[in-house]
Amino acid sequence: MGAEIFVEEKAKEFLGLYKNLTSVYWNATLTGEENKYNEVAEREIALKKFFNDKENFGKAKEFLRDEKDEVLKRQLKLLYDAYLSNQGSLDLLSEVSKKSSEVERKFNVFRADVDGKKVSDNEIKKILRDELDSGKLERAWCGFKKVGEIVKDNVLEVVRLRNKLARSLGFENYYEFSLDVSEQKESEIFEIFDELDSLIAKPFEDLKNEIDLNLAKKFGIEVKSLKPWHYGDLFFQEAPKIYSVDLDDFYKDDILEKARRYYESLGLSVDDILKRSSLFEAKGKYQHAYCMDMDRGGDVRTMQNLKNDENGMSTLLHELGHGVYWKYMSSDLPIVLRDTAHTFVTEAVAMIFGRKASNLDFVKKVCGEDFDDGGIIKKILRLEQIVFSRWTQVMFRFERELYKNPEQNLNKVWWDLVRKYQLIDFYRDKPDWASKIHIVSSPVYYHNYMLGELLASQLHSYIMENFSVDGDSYFGSREVGDFFKEKIFRVGARYRWDELIRRATGENLSARFFVREFVG
């Protein structure tokens, strides 16, 4: 069997297993039913078993070493990484999948108890945004964090199992292993995050002082009395509303039509994606958001819990960014290459569009609001981006510590990082870190959100410098839509992420565009 036949056969087998998994995952997250989550675990195991095949792993390795054709070699590299990521004991792989699925379900069906009432995550977020009573805020925040206490032991069990698997494959821990199979290096990522820290620490300190003065006034307390629940978000990953422009007012009407019209103006139709999607809250349903290509062939849909406010608009634009990436991927690509160049590249696309919810040009053209805000909306976006960059420092560094030594005092590690990077001086001896679902559902992933923000700024800079756009929302510019389709979407995973970025923008990935855009 030659390399080309090997790739074709394995790709076809993979696609069948992939479609089996995505279909049941969609139904599980739609309903929250335990039997469906059990089926997800079973189908994940089937996929892992496929890639656990040691004979085919050896063939992929051998073919990769000798192959000269670039397109075929790229497919072999991606197959090799998939095989490598699923090597080791099949029983152990199965156990990781089952345990992870069990924990994820606990998150999805959890509803916080606030003053004797069971409330959803969206309701908790609304309380934190709108409530002025510090006692109610604390009860809501602590009510949500209770999920961390419920799942902590299960989360640690999953982490230990993942580490055990990684060590069996010759890696120090799962963190190192996960980066390796996703074509990333720990040293490169730390260099970027350390550079960001050095450039943004002082601007954030100034902003944090401004935030604290505004919040102290809002709640009628002293700055030193501010607690995590005063910052308007469960993790202070989103910026509190301290400026006079409340963007929620611009999105109190149908955000679906606004998003649809915006993407249409770029020549990126999302009508079919929206028709297939589940967009609003339902009992037992997954409380977060995601977008998925169900079959690597055009069945693209998104799971959301939309509200007509700025956050809902931002989330919708973001997830549809993932959606158009999948939708406009060339059907001529081999199955193995019908994937995004890297997870943070699709995040960058989603983020560049998600940002438009906090963009004056977008508000004017899409929402029809003609006004002069005195530069406040730009200040809001700057605040949001810098606050988020500090939050990602916490998650990125905590996750590394978690896998490096899950037996250490993780409660202290968590709050030490919050103090250092978010400047919130608080501690309680509870597993608040475990209340972040991504630690289980998307392990060693969070740093990609920040890399995505960096690339989003780099893409934005390239667009503004090279295309004749009428405003920085790009509204109405099919030239921009064509750029995304031709340079990013259609090529799928044909190129490694760093080569794709060079081909699209002419430069390597750099933090300077983000810093220039949001720090100056």
Image (cartoon, grey):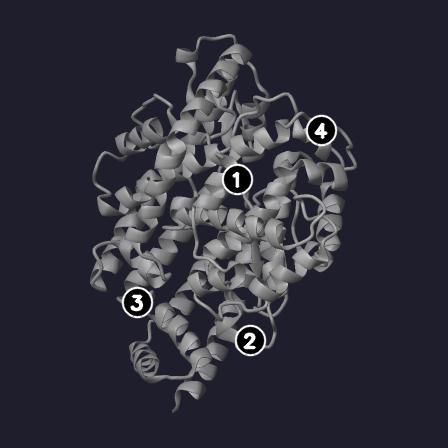
Give the residue type that dot 3 points to.
Leu
**Which tag, 2 or 4, sits closer to the chain's start?**
4
Residue named by callout 1? 517
**Which tag, 3 or 2, sits closer to the chain's start?**
3
Which labelled disc corresponds to residue 90? 3
Give the residue type that dot 1 points to.
Glu
Residue in the picture at 31% in, 78% down: 61
Counting other residues with Cα less than 10 Å from the Cα at mark 1, is it few (<14), some (14-19), or many (20 or more)?
A: some
Give the residue type that dot 2 points to.
Leu
Counting other residues with Cα less than 10 Å from the Cα at mark 3, is it few (<14), some (14-19), or many (20 or more)?
A: some
Which labelled disc corresponds to residue 249? 4
Circles 2 and 1: CB atoms closer than 8 Å: no
- As helix, strand or loop, the secondary structure at mark 3 comes to helix
The answer to whether residue 352 of the structure is visible from this angle is yes
In this rendering, the answer to whether 16 lies above or below 263 is below
Give the residue type that dot 4 points to.
Asp
Q: Position of residue 373 (x, y in %)?
A: 69, 26
Which numbered mark, 3 or 1, is in the foreground of this view? Answer: 1
**Label 2 to label 1, Cα distance in Å?**
35 Å
Which labelled disc corresponds to residue 153? none
As rendered, which of 231 and 516 lies closer to the eye?
516
Counting other residues with Cα less than 10 Å from the Cα at mark 2, is it few (<14), some (14-19), or many (20 or more)?
A: some
**Label 4 to label 1, Cα distance in Å?**
26 Å
**Which tag, 3 or 1, sits closer to the chain's start?**
3
Residue named by callout 2? 333
As drawn, is 73 to the left or to the right of 246? left
As rendered, which of 69 and 479 lies closer to the eye?
479
**Which tag, 4 or 1, sits closer to the chain's start?**
4
Q: Position of residue 99 (x, y in %)?
A: 36, 52
- As helix, strand or loop, the secondary structure at mark 1 comes to helix
